[in-house]
Image (cartoon, rainbow, N blue to C red):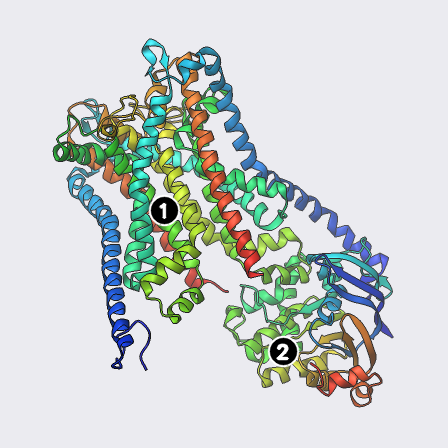
């Protein structure tokens, strides 16, 4: 069952650069789909179409459709706020809000107007457990989030998105600044989360792509070159360009 | 919230909560927008009222007299030229003091002074900037003017020179802090490159750093000048208030009258709607236009410099 | 190996000697230049310190409880300056009341809502111009609009409104800078969690910008408190036997009082003049100090 269907998506920025050219793909539910490729391939742009975060950028023209559970996300009538709660995002550099650990997790819920203390506390514990951070922080939830280490901050950002009970989680090079141990913890958390969420990940290395992908999409200069199950794509790529990139002939 | 969020039913639910928040937010947004426009509105208002009360002067007073050389309201003379020259002389003198000392101090703080000296100098300069001008005028009357009178053997110490000295002190903090910011903003790499090529720190300062910061320094000078032109109380208290045409060299050590001091000194005793009243507003108009010009030039300088820098760096 | 500009470990050739002499000349020129600049800086700064010290020294003896809490008598030559202190306090409060909400809102507009177009450029030019208008011209404007046209008369209200417009550009600049200093990433995160623009501003951006805004507000009010020209024809009174009890009353004020007693009262005891100047300085510099303290404490406590 496909969670997100991209239908002939083309995206152009006001400075003329064309970020996506006629991309079409189907992202299955409850799996980790990896979008990888060299810099400038359009991976982040594609990701930001899923939660309409591209509205904040200088986009000149968008054509095509992005269907989430059958509804076109790019439709101007779409309730963008509800969409963003349903499709959460974790960014490359961990950006913790200037609040406490608890305050970070509850921020999204407070935006919705939820004030019931018990409900908030439950959400805090649940989200932090899902992000594999609860054990490390549950005794100091009132501490400023900025005091956490990089890896912990990133898992906090994950928990922050999880608190809104999304259906899809987008991650844009989430472990690019982290040490191997923290990276491992994040990847392990994702493996657990995929059972209940649809995960779309832009990895920061081909190795990470190979490690985590259930499904993989290779993007090159705005075009989708190849899409398939992770095992198949990384061992027997069908396109020569995919193989060249995976084996490091260009990067 | 789960899979139903995309269905029309859930959309309706979310939409049901939205209008109330949107409506409140729309009002707030509108208020913020109007506040944003307020600056323009106020400038317009100020200009409008100055013109409303100042333009009649052009009608009531023959143009030749308005731009004549006698300001003697009691007998109906409203020539603004002596006031213009008064402002010019005092401001010119002030800049002659403030620019070298201001830029020199800024260079010192930014390029030479050790950390501890900077921590002392910057607050002190800010302190000067915070002193109300009436306090400086007060000290000018009690200390500066008598001292000048003694030193230069003058009939009175209330002169353009005293005004220039005080005004220089008033414009200084503006020049120092803005110029110092500009110098500080010059990238380290410029200095390092010059030093690596064999220049001494002194040569680097004047040959590389200062030119690199020149738009900021120019802005500092222009804004300092604007501050000097617009100063009222200090000059009113020490320049002697004699609306005499200030064109001879000796004028520097004689009493003069600035435009600002004229308004401040005479407005209180003027009948609303009289030619004198309108003439004072006319002077206000002149001051408004002058400060507008100075500011426009200052921002044009910065704009041109910035776009040139952008072209160079891109 | 020796660096250029320093005395080389000279080879015997002629070129080495020439090099050495020139570099010596350059170093001497630099030494002189440094000394000259430091003298300039000292000449700029020492008078400031001396001035403050002198005022404290001359005015200190005048300060007493009666001075601060009493009314002037004998044509200002004796008594206290309470009405001037209270008046300045009311004027500062009034200025804050009008300029802070308007200024902060305008700054929010510029930092968070406005796009880079001609209208925004016009607004910025207008702000720069407001900042440059001479204070006495503000006085004229206040006279024309508030005192006469709106018939508010010579009052605390007229003077405060005049001072607020004068203070507006300072507050807008400082507040806009404080808002822009808040990292953009916070806004992106907030939006990605479903926050609207106003929610993001109200919950994250504004609270984080408060120290910077507060500093700017205090510095702006400090200037307003020390200004004489804008209140000359809009609210200042020479002498009032009672404290003002409504915003439509005129009032005495410290800067105007100092001006009056130093220029218009014959036989004015010097000590009282210095004492008044001292009170004014303490008031103004106290605000400066507060702003500085807020600024450095906020910088230390920043969560980004």
For mark 1, name the chain: B
Q: Residue furthest bottom?
A: A235
**Which one is closest to the eye, mark 2 or mark 1?**
1
**Secondary element at tag 2:** loop
Q: Residues within 10 Å of mark 2 (few under 14, many from 20)?
A: many
Q: Residue C278: x and y, percent? A: 23, 40
For mark 2, name the chain: A
Q: Is residue C208 visible?
A: yes
* Residue at the spot of label 2: A175
Q: Is residue B122 above or below residue C60?
A: below
Residue drawn 81% across the image and 63% down it: A10
From the image, which quarter does the N terminus of chain B lie in?
bottom right
**Nearer to us in this view, C3 or C281:** C3
In this rendering, would A24 be left or right of B288?
right
* Residue at the spot of label 1: B175
Q: Is residue B135 visible?
A: no
* Residue B156 falls in image quadrant: top left
Q: Residue A191: x and y, percent? A: 72, 82
From the image, which quarter does the C terminus of chain B lie in?
bottom right
Q: Is residue A29 above or below residue B176?
A: below
Residue drawn 28% across the image and 42% down it: B97
Whether marks 2 and 1 lie on the same chain: no
* Residue C247 falls in image quadrant: top left
**Nearer to us in this view, C7 or B120:** C7
In this rendering, would C169 be left or right of A17?
left
């Amino acid at each position: 069952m496909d969670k997100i269907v991209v239908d002939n998506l083309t995206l152009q920025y006001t400075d003329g650069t064309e970020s996506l050219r006629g991309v079409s793909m189907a992202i299955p539910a409850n799996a980790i789909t990896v979008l990888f490729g060299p810099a400038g391939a359009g991976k982040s742009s594609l990701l930001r179409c899923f939660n309409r975060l591209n509205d904040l950028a200088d986009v000149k023209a968008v054509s095509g459709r992005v269907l989430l559970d059958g509804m076109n996300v790019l439709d101007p009538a779409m309730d963008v706020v509800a969409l963003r709660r349903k499709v959460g995002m974790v960014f490359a550099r961990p950006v913790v809000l200037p609040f406490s650990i608890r305050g970070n997790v509850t921020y999204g819920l407070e935006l919705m107007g939820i004030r019931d203390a018990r409900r908030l506390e439950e959400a805090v514990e649940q989200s932090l457990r899902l992000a594999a951070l609860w054990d490390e922080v549950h005794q100091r939830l009132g501490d400023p989030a900025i005091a956490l280490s990089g890896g912990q901050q990133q898992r906090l950002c994950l928990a922050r998105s999880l608190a809104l009970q999304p259906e899809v989680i987008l991650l844009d090079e989430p472990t690019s600044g982290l040490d191997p141990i923290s990276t491992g913890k994040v990847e392990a958390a994702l493996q657990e989360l995929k059972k209940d969420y649809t995960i779309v990940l832009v990895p920061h290395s081909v190795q990470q792509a190979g490690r985590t992908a259930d499904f993989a999409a290779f993007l090159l200069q705005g075009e989708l070159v190849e899409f398939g199950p992770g095992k198949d794509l990384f061992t027997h790529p069908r396109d020569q360009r995919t193989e060249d990139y995976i084996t490091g002939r260009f990067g | 919230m789960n899979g139903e969020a995309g269905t029309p039913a859930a959309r309706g639910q979310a939409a049901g909560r939205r209008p109330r928040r949107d409506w409140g937010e729309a009002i707030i947004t509108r208020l913020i927008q109007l506040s944003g426009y307020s600056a323009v509105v106020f400038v317009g208002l100020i200009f409008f009222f100055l013109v409303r009360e100042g333009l009649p002067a052009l009608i009531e007073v023959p143009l030749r007299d308005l731009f004549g050389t006698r300001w003697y309201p009691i007998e109906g003379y409203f020539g603004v030229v002596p006031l213009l020259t008064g402002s010019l002389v005092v401001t010119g003198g002030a800049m002659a003091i403030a620019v070298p000392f201001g830029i020199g101090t800024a260079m010192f703080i930014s390029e030479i002074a050790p950390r501890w000296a900077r921590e002392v100098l910057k607050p002190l300069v800010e302190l000067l900037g915070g002193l109300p001008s009436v306090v400086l005028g007060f000290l000018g009357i009690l200390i500066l003017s008598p001292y000048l009178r003694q030193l230069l053997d003058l009939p009175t110490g209330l002169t353009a020179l005293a005004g220039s000295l005080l005004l220089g002190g008033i414009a200084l903090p503006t020049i120092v802090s803005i110029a110092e910011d500009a110098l500080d903003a010059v990238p380290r790499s410029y200095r390092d490159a010059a030093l690596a090529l064999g220049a001494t720190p002194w040569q680097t300062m004047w040959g590389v750093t200062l030119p690199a910061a020149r738009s900021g320094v120019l802005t500092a000078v222009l804004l300092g000048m604007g501050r000097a032109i617009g100063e009222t109380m200090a000059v009113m208290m020490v320049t002697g208030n004699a609306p005499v045409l200030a064109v001879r060299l000796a004028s520097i050590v004689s009493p003069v009258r600035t435009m600002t001091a004229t308004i401040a000194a005479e407005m209180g005793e003027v009948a609303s709607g009289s030619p004198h009243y309108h003439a004072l507003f006319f002077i206000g108009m002149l001051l408004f236009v002058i400060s507008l010009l100075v500011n426009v030039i200052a921002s044009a300088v910065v704009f041109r410099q910035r776009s040139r820098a952008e072209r160079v760096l891109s | 190996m020796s660096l250029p500009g320093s005395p080389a470990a000279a080879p015997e050739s002629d070129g080495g000697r020439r090099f050495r002499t020139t570099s010596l000349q350059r170093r001497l020129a630099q030494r002189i230049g440094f000394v000259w600049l430091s003298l300039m800086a000292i000449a700029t700064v020492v008078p400031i310190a001396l001035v403050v010290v002198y005022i404290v020294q001359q005015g200190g003896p005048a300060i007493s409880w009666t001075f601060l809490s009493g009314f002037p008598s004998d044509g200002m030559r004796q008594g206290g300056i309470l009405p001037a202190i209270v008046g300045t306090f009311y004027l500062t409060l009034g200025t804050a009341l009008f300029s802070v909400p308007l200024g902060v809102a305008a700054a929010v507009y510029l930092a968070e809502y406005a796009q880079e177009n001609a209208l925004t450029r016009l607004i910025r030019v207008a702000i720069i111009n407001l900042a440059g208008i001479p204070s006495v011209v503000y006085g004229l404007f206040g006279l024309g609009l508030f005192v006469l046209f709106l018939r508010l008369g010579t009052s605390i209200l007229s003077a405060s409104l005049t001072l607020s417009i004068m203070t507006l550009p300072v507050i807008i600049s400082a507040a806009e800078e404080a808002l822009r200093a808040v990292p953009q990433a916070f806004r992106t995160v907030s939006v990605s969690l479903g926050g609207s623009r106003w929610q993001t501003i109200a919950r994250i951006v504004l609270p984080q910008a408060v120290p910077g805004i507060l500093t700017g507000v205090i510095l702006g009010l400090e200037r307003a408190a020390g200004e004489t020209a804008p209140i000359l024809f809009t609210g200042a009174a020479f002498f009032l036997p009672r404290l003002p009890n409504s915003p439509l009353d005129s009032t005495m004020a410290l800067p105007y009082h100092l001006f009056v007693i130093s220029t218009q009262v014959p036989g004015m005891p010097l000590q009282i003049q210095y004492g008044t100047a001292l009170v004014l300085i303490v008031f103004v510099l106290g605000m400066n100090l507060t702003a500085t303290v807020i600024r450095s404490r906020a910088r230390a406590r920043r969560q980004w």
